[in-house]
Image (cartoon, rainbow, N blue to C red):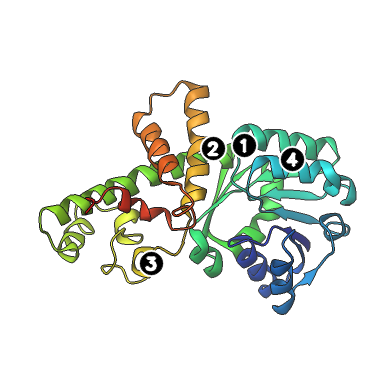
Amino acid sequence: MRIAFLGLGNMGSHMARNLHAAGYSVTCYDIVQEAVDAAERDGLATAASGAEAVGEAEVVITMFPAGEHVLAAYQDGLLESAPQDTLFIDSSTISVDHAVEAARLVTQAGHRALDAPVSGGTVGAAQGTLTIMVGGDSESFTQAKPLFDVMGGNIVHAGDTGSGQAVKLVNNMALAINTIAAAEAFSLGENLGLDPQVLYEVMSSSAAQSWSITTNCPVPGPVPDAPASRNFRPGFATALMAKDLGLAKAAIESTGTPASFGMAAYEAYTAFNTQENSGKDFSAIIKAKQKKG
């Protein structure tokens, strides 16, 4: 299966390398030349443009920052450059509306489409253990499933077009709320004079247990591999969480869903997403919850 992989950022680069390591023919492209050079050093084939990369592809995987980038790339040559009936898999995290529009453009051009956002951070991308949430028809999902199995450990066919993106934004809204709760709990514990290790031992094995505590603990020490123990190096950056919560906010408003905690999480991460914090792991939100001075 010939694959074109477009978008070699912190996540996409690992996903492309895993497909290459599994024996697939992968041709890569990114607008950042350093990312292309890194892929070449790892033995992957590269192209001078996205249109060139997809020229002989059976499957095109895109991993872009936002929905407008996906739509622009599709309209600016990708769809017309790919062979007929190419399967386009978009693993970017974008709005449901953008995912539906992207699929419409793909099918209109004589191709097939899946939306397949991922969760699991750079560690999951590197280890091939991502959760991949897929929206689209069953036949296309079946064709893509072997590729998903290389890149991820938990593959879920969520339903029709846009369903993958819908699951992703709901999941990340809950993750943000849990992370803020963990940050506030550890901050309160600190102000009460508690040892964070003691607090972790209780919370990680009791009713308060969550991924935001056991894996992504927001204080340094209890989880040595957590971003907090590595000066909040992501992981999953604050800027990306703020973007995803913007998508959740739009969905909350368009559906009229009462979600006060989700909206509060959106407001908290929007305020925290400053130039100083945008590149840090999203668990660094604890800094906004600690007493000053």
Query: How far apart are the alpha carbons under marks 3 and 4?
Result: 36 Å
Badge 3 is on which residue?
Answer: 231
Label 2 environment density (alpha carbons within 10 Å; few <14, some 14–19, many ≥20) = many
Please report whichever mark, 3 or 4, sits nearer to the chain's N-terminal start.
4
Badge 1 is on which residue?
Answer: 162
Please state the horizontal and vertical placement of residue 1, each as a whole percent of the image. 78, 63
| Location of residue 111 by image quarter | top right
The one nearer the camera, 138 or 169, is: 169
Badge 2 is on which residue?
Answer: 166
Q: Are marks 2 and 1 in contact (CB under 8 Å)?
A: yes
Please report whichever mark, 1 or 4, sits nearer to the chain's N-terminal start.
4
- Tell me the amino acid under the disc marked 4: Leu
Q: Is residue 182 above or below residue 259?
A: below
Q: Are marks 1 and 4 in contact (CB under 8 Å)?
A: no
Q: Secondary structure at mark 2?
A: helix
> Could you tell me which residue is drawn at 83 percent across and 49 percent down?
78
